[in-house]
Image (cartoon, helix red, strand yellow):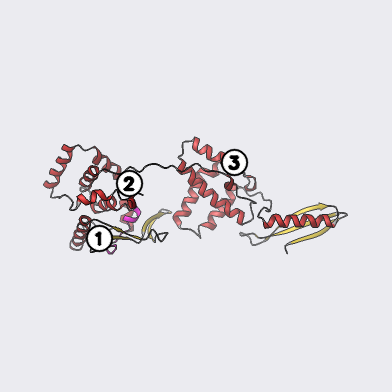
Amino acid sequence: MAGQIRKRGERAWLVRVYLGKDPATGSRKWFSRTVHGTRKDAEAVLYGLLRERDLGRLTVPSGVTLSDYVERWLEDVSRRVRPRTAEWYSATLRRWVLPTLGDRRLRDISALDVQMLYQGLLARGLSRTVVRGVHACLRAALRQAVRWSMLPVDPTARVKPPRDERREIRVLTPEEARRFLVAAREDRAWPLWWVLLETGLRPSEALALRWEDVDFERRVIRVQRSLVRAGGRVRFEEPKTRQARRSVPISEGLALELAEEEWDDRKKPYRWRWPDEVQAEVLAGLLELNAERARAEARSGAAAGAAEKKRGAKKAGWRTPRGASTTICSHDRSDSRR
């Protein structure tokens, strides 16, 4: 069933090449071409088309637009990737790609069209990081179109996305870290702030911790899950990669503070505890709102202001974090720069 030659009339032949089944309908797909001449001419055309098919250059001409194809692809890919990844694909393509190229026929999209799309996004003020994300999403979609024999080649393979933005990470100085800890002490989620500052965990990882993830004797925190928000819902998920499931060392001061919080959690349930899914969603929003304010307060506080805060903390019954001298330096570890 690789190919067929059918006589259509005097010195006219129909050459057909089988391209597999349509993934959506299950029907067989054929590429057809009419050849005028002898049967040997038709056979030569057939051999040439079979070679083009084997090289992945032969597709069935179709009027499917990029928008129609993306909808079909998103439906398929959502069954194979995590919900948050599928949501990212959908949001990125619908926001940045389809308004420009969505009405174009899939087979007519060229590498130049894609390159002009990226240049247009950069001209609108989008960062190179965002445009590289657009490239990753569009490439994933069009590569599948090639596998489904809807495109002969992937046009994104011939396009160079903008270079990745490599900016030096700005870390807190020891003095800024001290002020940050003093300021964060006022927040109910104080233990979480210290964990984030010292370990470099992502907020989604820190919000998914449980007391059983903290080894007080070995002074390590085990990252075994993360908080994921997708489709308007929040839930805990296993790490994507083996490297993401890891153990992170903590200072003696933080281990003692967490041990005390864990003890108080058993005695006073209304105190701080690692949140459940609903509480974690609320807390994630609070972290986003309060993080910059806490950093600004930590950085702008003068020596006199910091001393005043410490006096106020003592009046309110707070204490300087134990082991803070070791904690404030841990943010500079290479494994925390993420």
Query: Disc 2 vs disc 3: Cβ atoms closer than 8 Å?
Result: no
**Vertically, is 106 above or below 218?**
above
Residue designated by label 1: 219
Residues in magenta, as a range: 203-214
Residue beneath the point at 29% across and 53% down: 199
x and y percent of residue 251 in the render?
A: 23, 55
Q: In the visual, does 215 lie left or right of 11?
A: left
**Residue 35 pos. (x, y %):** 81, 52
Q: Is residue 212 magenta?
A: yes
Kind of element beneath mark 1: loop
- For residue 113, the mark is 3
Residue 224 is situated, as x and y percent measured from the top left of the image, at 35, 61
Q: Earlier in the sequence, mark 2 or mark 3?
A: 3
State how far apart marks 2 and 3 are (Cα): 37 Å
Amino acid under label 2?
Glu
Q: Determine crowd level at label 1: few under 14, some 14-19, many 20+ residues with C-alpha closer than 10 A.
A: some
Q: Is residue 185 left or right of residue 81?
A: left
Q: For residue 201, which numbered disc appears in the image? A: none
For label 3, the SS is helix
* Magenta highlight on residue 13: no
Q: Could you tell whether 210 is left or right of 74 in the image?
A: left
Comes first in the chain, label 3 or label 1:
3
Q: Which residue is mark 2?
A: 288
For discs 2 and 3, the disc positioned in front in the rendered view: 3
The furthest residue to the right: 10
Query: Quick one: 199 or 1, which is closer to the camera?
Result: 199
From the image, state whether disc 3 or disc 1 is nearer to you. 1
> In the rendered structure, which amino acid carries the disc numbered 3?
Asp
Q: Is residue 302 above or below residue 212?
A: above
